Image (cartoon, rainbow, N blue to C red):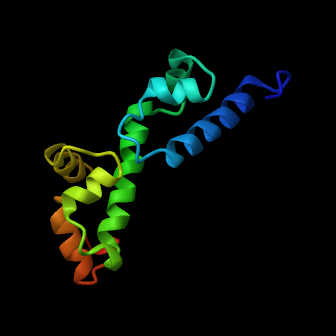
Amino acid sequence: MDRFAPAGGRDQRLLAGVQAFIDAHLRDEQLTPRVVAAANHISVRYLHQIFQRQGNSVAAWIRTRRLDRCRCDLEDPALDGRPVYAVGARWGLAPASDFNRSFRAAYGVPPGEWRRAAQRGRSCTER
C-alpha cells in the first residue's frame, strides 16, 4: 500500500482486497472476521471499520455473498440433483435450518421453492 495515498484510497484498495479474499474462501465454514483480518494483516477492529464506512458489516457481507452463490447454484440446471441442504453447506451455510431461514429472509422464498421456480424457467425479475 502507498502510505502517502489518501486514507480513503487506501481503505478502498484494502476493502477490495479483503472482499476478493472473502470471495475466494466462501466455502470455508470457519470464515470469520478474525480469519479475514489475520489473512489481510489488519486488526479485527480495523476490518470492521472499513466495512462500516461502506454501510455494511463483515458478517453481513459474507452471508450475502454466500447466499448469492447458493442462489446461482439453485438456478443451475447442472446442479438439480444436488440436495438443497448440500447447496447451502457447499457455501458454508450449515445447518440446513439456518440456510433455509437466511435464504428466505434474503429472497422471500425458501431455497427449494426458488429452485422449482428456476426449473420452470422463470427469470429472477418474475419472482
Q: Nearer the viewer, residue 8 or 66?
A: 66
User: Compared with residue 78, is residue 92 higher up or lower down, i.e. above or below?
Assistant: above
Q: Nearer the viewer, residue 54 or 101?
A: 101
Side of 21 where 63 appears, left or right: left
Q: How far across and down, in percent of the image, does residue 113 sit?
A: 16, 67
Side of 110 where 7 appears, left or right: right
Which quadrant would residue 126 be assigned to in this image?
bottom left
Q: How far across and down, in percent of the image, does residue 73 sit?
A: 35, 66
The quarter of the rendered structure image containing the N terminus is: top right
> Which residue occupies 39% across, 57% down?
69
Q: How far across and down, in percent of the image, does residue 86 sit?
A: 24, 58
User: Compared with residue 119, is residue 25 higher up or lower down, i.e. above or below?
Assistant: above
> Which residue occupies 67% across, 35% down?
12
User: Compared with residue 52, is residue 112 higher up or lower down, i.e. above or below?
Assistant: below
Q: How far across and down, in percent of the image, does residue 72 sit?
A: 37, 65
Which residue is at the far bottom?
121
> Which residue occupies 20% across, 65% down?
83
The quarter of the rendered structure image containing the C terminus is: bottom left
> Which residue occupies 22% across, 67% down?
114
For the image, the number of numbered tags is 0
User: Compared with residue 107, is residue 50 higher up or lower down, i.e. above or below?
Assistant: above
Side of 124 where 127 appears, left or right: left
Which quadrant would residue 123 be assigned to in this image?
bottom left
Q: Nearer the viewer, residue 14 or 107?
A: 14
